[in-house]
Amino acid sequence: MSFNFTALTLFSSLSSHISLTYGLSIESLKWAASAFTIGIFFAFLIGHSKYFEYEPKLGVLVAGLAVSIPQFLIPFIGNFIAITALRIVQGLAMAAIPIFSYQAGTVFPKHRTLAIGIIVSGIFVGGFLGSTLGPELALHIGWRFTFIVFGLVTLILTLTYVTLVPDKYLPPKRVTEEDVRFSVWREKFTVIWGFTFFPGLWIVFTLAPLIHFISESMCGVSGTLSSTLLESSYIIWSYIPGVALALLKYSRLNIKALFRSVAVTQAILYMLSMIGALIILLIHNPTVFLVLLTILAAVQGTGPTFWSVQTIAYPKHIAHKAGYALGVISNSAALVGPIVTLLISSLGSTNIWLLVIALNIAGAVITLIGMKIRLPVERHSPRQGE
């Protein structure tokens, strides 16, 4: 996950080099840079197809190839449309998330939220590496070879995973009659819980690229400092929910209580982020702004809690299918979030904070609604009681 997203971030951090080489404007490259969010949505849509659902290693392989192959091609293709298309393809990197979440939930059931948090934090570790290590490496070997180096590393790691990970740690390949009869889409819980992460994803994936502009225009704070602090805080908040739940020994609870503890944690994270955004809106102080960014980043903690539910709420044999369905719903935010936020930001940075506040409140409310719905595992797997 880290090197997948290092490659994705590299495009933005080296955009000035790409602009000089191909004669493309920085403004147009910004659109190309954010195009991968469209691919994120389609990653779950494609992953939900019957073929990929029961071939988990193929899904991870496609995710890795979708990142690495464009890394090899972009240094030699100067056409804006072609580059944008390749960036959309790179968004398929997220196709691996339901597989990794399934593994974390089944291999580490007592610490599933923490395990998933470590995996998801790779997104922001990759972002940090891409924005720091990438430009430094480009100074020594050029941006083209930098792209190729990270593409090779991603490809090697992907092939290592596909070759070495035992099948016993993967979702089942066999399609049973029970699998065919069970449709995660008919479950009310799937729709509601899928939308609990819609606001969180919207905030996380759109605030990061805008924080540079917001911090300088509102508080006169260095955009680079604010961006680095936000990304670092995202990493830390990826771990906090898992650590907190582990300390509370939540794994000893029954299924319903286990789900409720995760859902309550998610709602609290949304409210913490909302409070951070509200105070930022009211107090325009550089020091306070930087401190509150670390609280605002609590919204990233909703990622591990959201993906933890995949192996709690659904019978084990279809948990991986549920992961793709939940991903399709939640990641629809990647289609509308960046465009809507960019339009709103053009009206002033104040509107961005109002949007962030509203999204956090919506996330908390939908999470609380989801807590009241009967879990699919209770409805369809009473004899398992797992």
Image: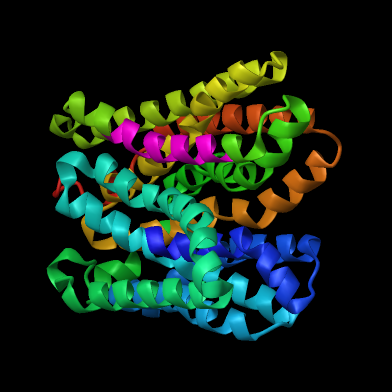
Seen from this angle, which residue lies furthest top? 283
74 over 289 or under it: above or below: below
Residue at 58% x, 36% y: name it. Answer: 225
Query: Which quadrant of the figure has residue 156?
Result: bottom left
The quadrant in which the N terminus is found is bottom left
Residue at 33% x, 79% y: name it. Answer: 58
Query: Residue 223 location in percent, x, y?
Result: 66, 38
The quadrant in which the C terminus is found is top left
The answer, for residue 41, to whether it is visible in the render is yes
Query: Which quadrant of the figure has residue 256?
Result: top left
Near-viewer residue (118 or 22): 22
Residue at 50% x, 43% y: name it. Answer: 197
What secondary structure is the magenta-colored segment mainly? helix
Query: Residue 37 location in percent, x, y?
Result: 60, 60
**Residue 238 belongs to magenta span:** yes
23 over 366 or under it: above or below: below
- Drawn side of residue 344 relative to residue 221, left or right: right
- Drawn side of residue 147 relative to residue 338, left or right: left
Magenta stretch, residue numbers: 227-242
- Drawn side of residue 291 relative to residue 24, left or right: left
The answer, for residue 175, to whether it is visible in the render is no
Near-viewer residue (318 or 82): 82
Near-viewer residue (40 or 321): 40
**Residue 344 belongs to magenta span:** no
Seen from this angle, which residue lies furthest front? 140
Query: Residue 248 location in percent, x, y?
Result: 20, 23
